[in-house]
Amino acid sequence: MPYTSELKELIKRVDATRPSRIEKKKKGEEFPMLSLKEREERLRKFHPDFKEGSRREIRVGPNKGYGISPEIVDLLEAKSRVDPDMIDLTKITYETDVLILGGGGAGTAAALTAQENGAKVLIATKLRHGDANTMMAEGGIQAASKETKDSLYYHYLDVLGGGHFKNVPELVYTLVTEAPNVLAWLESLGCMFTKFPDGRLKSLHGGGTCRKRMHYAADITGAEIMRTLRDEARNRIEDIKLLEFSPAVELILNEHGHCAGAVLYNLETEEYFLVKAKAVIMATGGSGRLHIQGYLTTNHYGATGDGLVMGYRAGVKLCFLHTVQYHPTGAIFPEQAEGLLITEKFRGAGANVLNIEGEQFVNEREPRDVESASFIRECLEVGKGIPTHTGKVGVWLDSPMIDILMGEGAVKREFPGKFILFKRFGIDISKEPMLVYPTLHYQNGGLEYNSRCETSIPGFFSAGEVSGGVHGENRLMGNSLLDVCVFGRNAGVSAALYAKEKARDGKLTLDHVRKYHKELEEAGIITDRVSPMLLPDYSNPKVRERQLTAHYLGTIR
Amino acid sequence: MEVEKNEELVPIFIMGKRYEVPSSLTIQKAMEYAGYQLIRGCGCRGGICGACGTVYKFPGSYKIEIGLACQTVVQPNMYLTQIPFFPAIKSVYDIEKVKPTIETLVKAYPELLRCLQCNTCTKSCPMEIEVMDYIAAAMRGDVARLAELSFDCVMCGLCTSRCPAEICQYNIAILGRRLYGKYIAPKAEHLASVVKDIEKGKYEQMLRNLMDTDEETLKDLYNKREIEPEQADEDWTPKDKTYL
């Protein structure tokens, strides 16, 4: 629906302050950035991570005592979907060199490099190939590609500053060093990056960058990368096989303690079946659909943190899960678009964020956590948020500024995806601002791994959002598309080489699951919960009450 | 799912079966409200993944309407079904060996030339893409135009489901876009040079030094970083060039 008359009245205040804000922008006068100390204080007071009850200690497993989001702890303190005693480990349905769990950006990039290194690959994915947060990433991909003004040195510093200087240095080194090469690789696969007529890549700022190094393909960068990688994987169908609607529910180890496959679940026929592999790559992505602290999310339907659970049960440590990323600009109007990602690129292109008076209250390019905390402060503490008729409150993102700064038609040209989407709802975002509020966006942490994507279990590799360390406590914009490409590619190479040179065949086992169940029992955790969750539950509870003969295992039937 | 009290309920017909759902919901949320637990036909829930192509009709109208279930708000008396999957041809090719020409397109998808120019594909596109126009561009061998016109494609397959010439438009489109991106768009030459410098180890020592630096010093370096002004031109250069 279009803006209500009340909101249209309030938009007039934004219109009124716009000319002077444009003047300032043109003169390079920016709203002052917060110092590191001020940032810290703002986070402590207003970021959801610091809210009481936002963390709970895990009572079992390798990270016993580590405090993270209760929604994730609930999944870790839950039983397997399958009773190990009911699985016949001699009945193998598929065998492959490299099994990749997850068909998003990291999984698909891994499939390509594993294949190039001689491996037969099987991708098992919960929904369709490409159904992933990668597809939804809009803003861009970072790389220090311009030697006249930028370098790996500055990219490295920016990543660290965003991550509160807690990032794992080796991972950051790899991320920034391989970034330009990843861009060249994507270009060679035919990705249509937005360029100047001479071929030079266009680039913008993102929150927390000191140089404009956000490269993009209009406002659908992730979709462009994902559909290109997927098309390339489909061209290699001889070596890269695909199982859709078949999520993994447990890893399988062997008698040597090496990873040797996974138990998969056919979501449609509801059968469990086994894949034996010489190496396994976990690339299941993030966990936004857990709706941590009740927040709306920008994430894909399948983002339920499955890989954390499987890896943890098998004995891999978790790290950096004590912080969760809230994207500052999730749509809160119209209701149909709630939670939807409004790319940071709008702010990178110059759009101010404003309160109900049409005044600026924070620089629009602070790192994401600081920006989010500032929005929450303005709405909840200062009380200058903009209320909607559905009881939400948010701040304005002044997209019409972009048409004025970059020339008429710029919003439509640079943000075609969002322009069409809002047009359908009767809102012209080149003329009217958008209403936004922080929304659950990214799982900063995950499974512990190194720059070759090895974990503590031989034969088990991890890549992409399911892993933790490279982004420290807060990821910067444009570093997740980069992450999935860099570490996805590395995982594929490592897993293929491992399959070729190091993998040792042995008797398969699910004893780690039995052991984990026992540990739950010993910790006094008596529960009916099962995990991984696989899909969130959005069906109507009243209908469920009337499904008298249906049996639910967790959230799904 | 939370639904506000007193919200108006409207009748919709999911695969012919009547349900009453709140009038503000999208088709996707309305199906969930009706009791469906979606497995097929649900993906990003944000209009970009193409999982939830949906067709619908109103009583008394001949017209088949289309939309993405996650983006289309229900209307009273709509008769709808999702088309979560539609069989399609995907040509296998080696991107390194093909050329950006009409021969490549026709060899990969000979049915391209069967286009009747009926425009049903364009009318079936939830992204408002001029599908028939890009197919026409493909038939002329205008790969650049094909790529440009099809750029917003979410590959939902609704065009293909309705094409009387049995063309798979969206797979022709991605072939076109990859040919354009690889062979026609001007190369980003600056990438090659920075990659070469990285391989030669130009930044190695700088990075290793940073990796060994303590947190306080890092914070200091971070605070002192020179920020490229937002309105700066492409040819802006920093004052301190030590670390370039």
Image: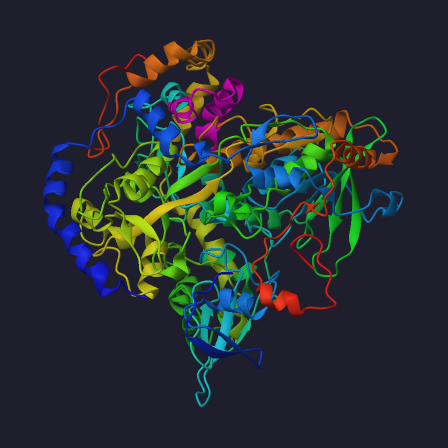
- Taking the image as shown, residue B203 lies to the left or right of residue A419, namely right
Residue A478: percent from the left, percent from the top? 41, 36
Figure check: B213 above or below A261: above
What is the count of numbered marks? 0
Q: Answer with the quarter of the image where residue A501 lies.
A: top right
The reply to whether residue A282 is visible in this rendering is no
- Taking the image as shown, residue A554 lies to the left or right of residue B211, namely right
The reply to whether residue B209 is visible in this rendering is yes
Q: Main secondary structure of the magenta part?
A: helix
Say which quadrant the C terminus of chain A sits in.
bottom right
The colouring scheme, among rainbow, by chain, secondary structure or one colour, is rainbow
Residue A244: percent from the left, percent from the top? 66, 54
- Taking the image as shown, residue A467 lies to the left or right of residue A374, namely right
The magenta segment is A158-182
Say which quadrant the N terminus of chain A sits in.
bottom left
Please give the name of the residue rendered at 40% of the width and 27% of the height, measured from the top-left corner.
Answer: A162
- Which residue reaches farthest bottom? B60
- Taking the image as shown, residue A130 lies to the left or right of residue A187, namely right
Figure check: A224 above or below A183: below
Please give the name of the residue rendered at 40% of the width and 34% of the height, measured from the top-left corner.
Answer: A47
Please give the name of the residue rendered at 44% of the width and 22% of the height, measured from the top-left corner.
Answer: B196
Figure check: A342 above or below B208: below
Please give the name of the residue rendered at 73% of the width and 61% of the height, measured from the top-left corner.
Answer: A551
Observer-nearest of B51 and A223: B51
* Residue B21 is one of the magenta-drawn residues: no
Observer-nearest of A338 and A23: A338
Residue A480: percent from the left, percent from the top? 47, 36
Q: Answer with the quarter of the image where residue A526 lies.
A: top right
Residue A18: percent from the left, percent from the top? 14, 47
* Residue A160 is one of the magenta-drawn residues: yes
